[in-house]
Amino acid sequence: MIRYTREVLNKIERQNFFKMPLRRTIVLFSVLFFVVIAFGSSLAYYFVMRKVLSENSMKELKLTMNIRRTLIKAKLDKEILLIKVFANATPVRNYFLNPSDEYLKKEYFTILNEHKEYFQNKMISWINIKDSNYYVNEQFMEKFDSSNPNHSWFFETLKYENPPLIKVDFDYLVRQIYDLYINYPIYYEDKAIGVVSSRYSLFEFITNLNLPENFYVFGEDGVIIGAANEKIAQEKKTIMDLFGSAGEDVYKKSLSLGKDSSEILYFSKNHYSISKVGGMNLFLMSDNEINIKTIIHEKASIVLLALLLLMALSFIIFNMFILHILKPMNKNMQVYIESSLLDELTKIPNRRFFNMRIEDEWSRATREQYPVSFLMLDLDKFKKYNDTYGHLEGDILLQESAQIFTDCLSRASDFVARIGGEEFCIVLANTKIEGARKIAEEVRGSMAKSGKITVSIGLVCEIPKVGSDYKNFIEFADQKLYEAKNTGRNKVVG
């Protein structure tokens, strides 16, 4: 009997839009409301923090880049000043005018040895137009040849209008590494008569910069020649290899930069800061990624998390309060159901509930076109039993009969109702006549086995048509019951 009470309670509690109990609806709505607020505020926080961190990152990257570029420039300026002083020394110019003069040569090597101690790598090379000899320190290396592409820097320096000419070249004669060359022309009467060069080991140069992991040095061809990870430079990877399409954009932008200029580019979650170093045609680049992990590590994220937890706690307290309020309401509703929709004696649905339920079931069966079976039951000779054993025993018999009818049903959609004194009915949704007859016989047999009383049953089954009335359906079942009573009782007709 309790099953019917809960079923009706849930039915009354149900909301049209969610078709679930009111308590669950309120909890669900509050959870959804919290999720929407939490998700919305987290999303807004993410975009705001991303913008703030992006702006801060840009400022930090630009500041760091300027500091690195300043360090590079300071080291280069020292080398440039040294080579300029050396190139403008009178003994150097005299030697280049007459390289075969032994006295002038001796003077030149004396000043060479004095100056080279101050250079980073203590190496000075030169080429004189008159004898075309290429020297490194005091050692002759090879003859200068205008057709040799390795000597193109010499012509370039002679024509360069704003010395020194700074280049990155591979030393194929001595060190077998990339060096940073500072080439300065020797002038006589405003005409270049040779070139002197100092060099700086590019590897040492970059190592001394103590580059962070997100910093890279690359040349005009995009090849990375310096990084915290030496393997990248050794494998001659390009910016495009490391950063894909973003690397291509960075590379193209770097080629358009002016001397000592810098710029920051933004691609998706990454920021790229690029800077051109002096007149070397070298470029510094750093990248910084802003993602959810970065944002979570911000102190402001702790405040947001605390607010969300406080909000969650508020929602929990709110739901507990609502459930506390609804609890007595549910009890009152249960009392109402037991008094108005359930039969007071048998605790199964009464005539009022039956009228509500059969109308709903008939409409549903009409829409979905499935059969509805209906059993009209009447206890045989109940008045005689009541008169013989008394009204108290008669009430007990009614309760036991209701329990027997209920026990014969297995589906939640099927139900028993008391619609009169000793009259009951059973509604079987989506049940064909064969299945309904089987249940009817089970009910009849169970009552007969009780040894107290038998039951007569009128059975009808129909697939409702549009516009048909369920009242005619019930009246037809009543006729079948009348037939069962008049043909000997304790039988099923239909």
Image (cartoon, grey):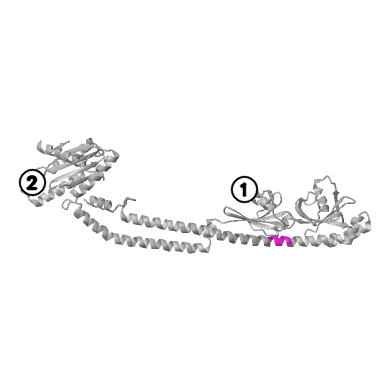
**Label 2 SS:** helix
Where is 98 relative to 410, above or below?
below
| Mark sitting on residue 421 | none
Identity of the amino acid at label 1? Ser
Residue under numbered circle 2: 383
Query: Residue at left 47%, top 59%?
Result: 41
Residue under numbered circle 1: 245
- Is residue 411 covered in magenta? no
Q: Earlier in the sequence, mark 1 or mark 2?
A: 1
Q: Residues within 10 Å of mark 1 (few under 14, many from 20)?
A: few
Give the total number of marks visible in the rendering: 2
Q: Are circles 1 and 2 on residues that touch, CB within 8 Å?
A: no
- Is residue 71 covered in magenta? yes
Q: Which residue occupies the foreground of this view, 134 or 31?
A: 31
Left or right for 391, reference 56:
left
Q: Which residue occupies the foreground of this view, 158 or 109?
A: 158
**Where residue 212 sits in the image (x, y, percent)?**
64, 58
Q: Give the quarter of the image for residue 13.
A: bottom left
Query: Residue at left 10%, top 49%?
Result: 394
Identity of the amino acid at label 2? Lys
Magenta segment range?
A: 68-73
